[in-house]
Amino acid sequence: MIIDVHAHAGPWFFATDVGAAELNLALMDRYGIDRQIVAASEAVTYDTVSGNRWMAEVLEVHPRLLGYVVLNPDDLAAAARELEKYLPSGRFVGVEVPGRLLSRAVQDTVALAAEAGLPVLVHTWDDSVLGLVDVLERHPDLRVVAGHMGGPAWRTAVEAATRTDRLYLEPCCAITDAGRYRYALDRVPLAQMLFGTGSTAVDPAIALGAVVDAGLTEDEHEHVMWRNAARLFGISTDQVASSSPALSLANTRSRSWKR
């Protein structure tokens, strides 16, 4: 079983062949991903209200997808309305907050998510990821997924995750260093390690390659690839099923990631 905790659906502003949510599902089939937690790219880059509305429509017809409600940190009142609108559906299991990581506006917005009891995905790409430790200390109910695991600042992200048990790391990154995910696994409590792909902006093969490179044990594989995510996001795994077989540890290690 595989649960991907970091994905987007919809068109991007750069020249890639990405648009419909059906591409998410096609990539999930290709790589054996059973469930994927998705935010609308429109909501992240342009219009949260329109993007979240489109995402809600997608989730109604694609049960393998779950959603992030994207909140605009520049309008706290509107962010609160978006949460109130979409949480009752049960199809949105987390919040994504774009913007400067440690700005006051972003911190106020993640506090809304903490009050709602939802995990928050933020994109991390520099040493500011360490500042999340202080943010988490101020909000005891907050749980944060550090998207991209700090990017080039991945060692700093690992240090941050060793200081709090409510900061989670996932490996997706368009360009990645060898040994990065194994470095994290050897230092961060296993319960805080997740799997995310960055799909559809990047091909899931990159994150899967990071997993293969890490040489996971059976226990690590089970927790990283689905068990930790199911617990964090409250996902029932009883009926999780993919139209293609979920990847076992053996074929995750050996499969050739070719189109």
Image: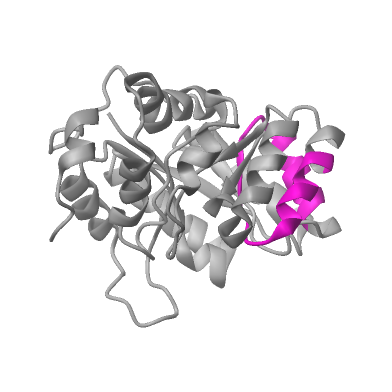
Q: Where the C terminus falls, by quadrant? A: bottom left
Residue at image point 51% right, 56% down: 52
What color scheme is it? Answer: one colour
- On the image, the x and y values in percent for residue 108 come to 81, 49
Identify the image quadrant of residue 217: top left
Along the horizontal axis of the image, is 55 left or right of 117? left
Which is the main secondary structure of the residues drawn in magenta? helix
For the question of whether residue 248 can be seen, the reply is no
Q: Where the N terminus falls, by quadrant? A: top left
* Vertical position of residue 123 compared to residue 225: above or below: below
Q: Return the residue nearer the eye: 127 or 53.
A: 127
Along the horizontal axis of the image, is 255 left or right of 149? left
* Vertical position of residue 258 compared to residue 4: above or below: below
Q: Return the residue nearer the eye: 4 or 41.
A: 4
Numbered marks: total: 0
Q: Return the residue nearer the eye: 28 or 58.
A: 28
Identify the image quadrant of residue 115: top right
For the question of whether residue 92 can be seen, the reply is yes
Range of the magenta residues? Answer: 106-134
Identify the image quadrant of residue 86: top right
- On the image, the x and y values in percent for residue 47 come to 57, 69
Residue furthest bottom in the image: 15
* Vertical position of residue 97 compared to residue 112: above or below: below
Residue at image point 59% right, 25% down: 189
User: Is 124 included in the stretch rendered in magenta?
Assistant: yes
User: Is 42 included in the stretch rendered in magenta?
Assistant: no
Residue at image point 42% right, 73% down: 12
- On the image, the x and y values in percent for residue 212 come to 30, 42
- On the image, the x and y values in percent for residue 204 come to 31, 54
Residue at image point 32% right, 21% down: 218
